[in-house]
Image (spheres, helix red, strand yellow):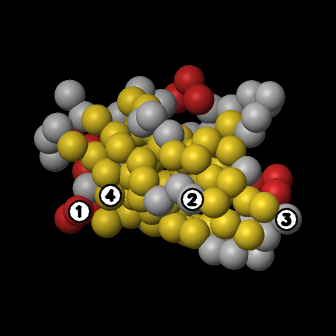
Amino acid sequence: QVQLVESGGNLVQAGDSLRLSCAASGGTSSTYYAMGWFRQAPGKEREFVATINWDGAVTYYADSVKGRFTISRDSAKSTTYLQLTRLNSEDTGVYYCAAAKSGAVGISERYYDIWGQGTQVTVSS
């Protein structure tokens, strides 16, 4: 069973950058999974942030992060990254990574089969 563990969350100031990591363990099958990042701000529902297909050729972003965040993956390390730049207070929240066995990009939570526990990002203004 594949498991996901996020890391890299921190308290930063507005305008700073951060890189989140999502490490997959429990087998090599995750190499063929699509990966996604979601976030949940205090008092709000979880929302889609970014997704990447199984071979890294296709990515898709929420409008709110387009041009500021970059999703990438290193299959050799079974790790997916989310580079966050020009952070602002609205980016504060718990960031979750998720894996979809289908391999294609997806923006709906229901599309994803496996979820991590999340990592906290707090942006102070």
Q: Which mark is residue 125?
A: 3
- From the viewer's perspective, is the residue at label 1 or at label 3 nearer? 3
Amino acid at dot 1 = Lys
Label of residue 118 in the image:
none
For the N terminus, the quadrant is: top left
Instruction: Indicate which disc, 1 or 3, sits on the residue closer to the N terminus.
Output: 1
Give x and y (percent) for residue 87.
Answer: 74, 67
Q: Is residue 64 left or right of residue 6?
A: right
Q: Choose top left, top right, bottom left or bottom right for residue 95.
A: top right
Which comes before the other along the chain, label 3 or label 4?
Answer: 4
| Image quadrant assignment for residue 55 | bottom left
The picture places residue 8, in percent across and down from the top left corner, at 47, 59
* Marks 3 and 2, the one that precedes in the sequence: 2
The residue tagged 1 is 77
The amino acid on which the numbered mark 4 sits, given as a three-letter code, is Thr
Of the two numbered discs 1 and 2 in the rendering, the one whose residue sits closer to the viewer:
2
> Which numbered disc, 1 or 2, marks the residue that appears first in the sequence?
2
Q: Which mark is residue 10?
A: 2
Please provide percent x and percent y for residue 113.
41, 27
Q: Residues within 10 Å of mark 4 (few under 14, many from 20)?
A: many
Q: Which labelled disc corresponds to residue 79?
A: 4
Cβ atoms under marks 1 and 4 closer than 8 Å: yes
Q: Residues within 10 Å of mark 2 (few under 14, many from 20)?
A: some
Q: Residue at x 20, y 64 (%)?
A: 76
Q: Residue at x 78, y 70 (%)?
A: 14
